[in-house]
Amino acid sequence: MKKNPKVSVIMSEYNTPVEKLDLLSKFDIQQVFQQNEIDAVLHFAASKSVNESVKNPLKYYKNNISSMVNLLEVMKDFNVKKFIFSSSAAVYGSTAQQPISELVDTQAMNPYGQTKVIGEDFLNDLYISDNEWSIAVLRYFNPIGAHESGLLGEQPNGTPNNLMPLITQVASKKRRLLYVFGNDYNTIDGTGVRDYIHVVDLAKGHVSAVQKLFSTHGLHTYNLGTGEGYSVLEIINTFEKVNNVDIAYKIVDRRAGDPPICFANPTKAKEELGWSAERTLEDMCRDSWQWEKTLENIILPN
């Protein structure tokens, strides 16, 4: 069948096809499934800025939910029933229970988190309707870092929404100042506390989840985090110490929709997937800076 001109295909260095398309187009998704032999789907595609979702909730509900429904419908049509969903710790909202286990009720504080709650509800209803599905819901905490080689990392478009790219851009003088949103939370130093996980550990968690899907049916939900909470100022101080650089920052008002504390109880993932995070906060800060320095010396494609 002739390829849809809206679906661009790139061959990676490992000769793996990469097809770029819009999941809001169900026809484009169908083309991919028709032209490839697919056994399982790992679904990462979503808008993910808490702040932007508060300002523009319609964008988030349309993009994050409608695209997922399209994808699941096509999977069902092609009898592909192994699915991994990128969820988020944002589903927990502001809960007094710390660390947070998967048994804590979901109570998202912002539209981004609510789209993840709705996505999880869809998957629960889907499994109830057809128990041949094998589904893993992975609730990410705060991924940071890059591959230790310095050759693979995050390149945000425009102003980053996450802490670490902002820190590295200040360190490299691309940005004059880091804004810290709030220092009046009930935390160790007044700044927000999060569970930061190295992106390589997160990737390995997905490998373990895929293996789980091929050994059993069911819907399984896992926290992917370290079980440690670090404040914004602790992240800044660790980055400065590990990389011997200064980070200029300014305290400003809190952001809407940000809970004060959020860190994981990752016991279930360790017991059922045999997975646990291995890299330290120092590793995350070091690898993030190595990637930023690599970006200074290469020109990446748009």
Image (cartoon, grey):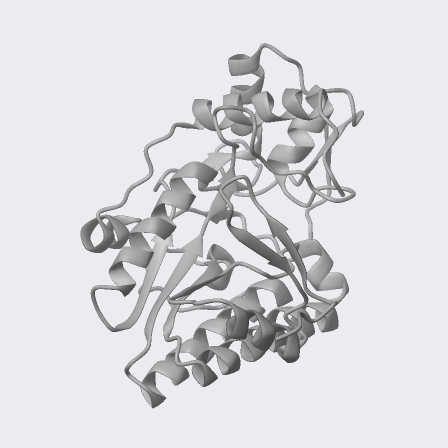
Q: Quadrant of residue 293?
A: top right
Image side of residue 174 versus residue 101, left or right: right
Tell me where residue 271 appears, x and y as whole percent. Answer: 19, 51
Residue 229 visible to the viewer: no
Label total for image: 0
Q: Nearer the viewer, residue 254 or 47?
A: 47
Furthest toward the top, the residue is: 244
Q: Nearer the viewer, residue 119 or 292?
A: 292
Please tell me which residue is depicted at 76% across the width and 42% down the height of the picture. 159
Tell me where residue 54 appears, x and y as whole percent. Answer: 71, 63
Tell me where residue 264 appears, x and y as whole percent. Answer: 37, 48
Q: Nearer the viewer, residue 97 or 158?
A: 158
Q: Quadrant of residue 70?
A: bottom right
Image side of residue 96 versus residue 72, left or right: left
Residue 47 visible to the viewer: yes
Residue 52 against residue 99 in the figure, above or below = below
Residue 190 against residue 283 in the figure, above or below = below
Image side of residue 223 versus residue 172, left or right: left
Quadrant (top left, top right, bottom left, bottom right) of the N terminus: bottom right
Tell me where residue 223 appears, x and y as whole percent. Answer: 36, 54
Quadrant (top left, top right, bottom left, bottom right) of the C terminus: top right
Furthest toward the bottom, the residue is: 129
Residue 214 against residue 68 in the figure, above or below = above
Residue 4 against residue 166 in the figure, above or below = below
Please tell me which residue is depicted at 42% across the width and 57% down the height of the picture. 139
Image side of residue 267 versus residue 41, left or right: left
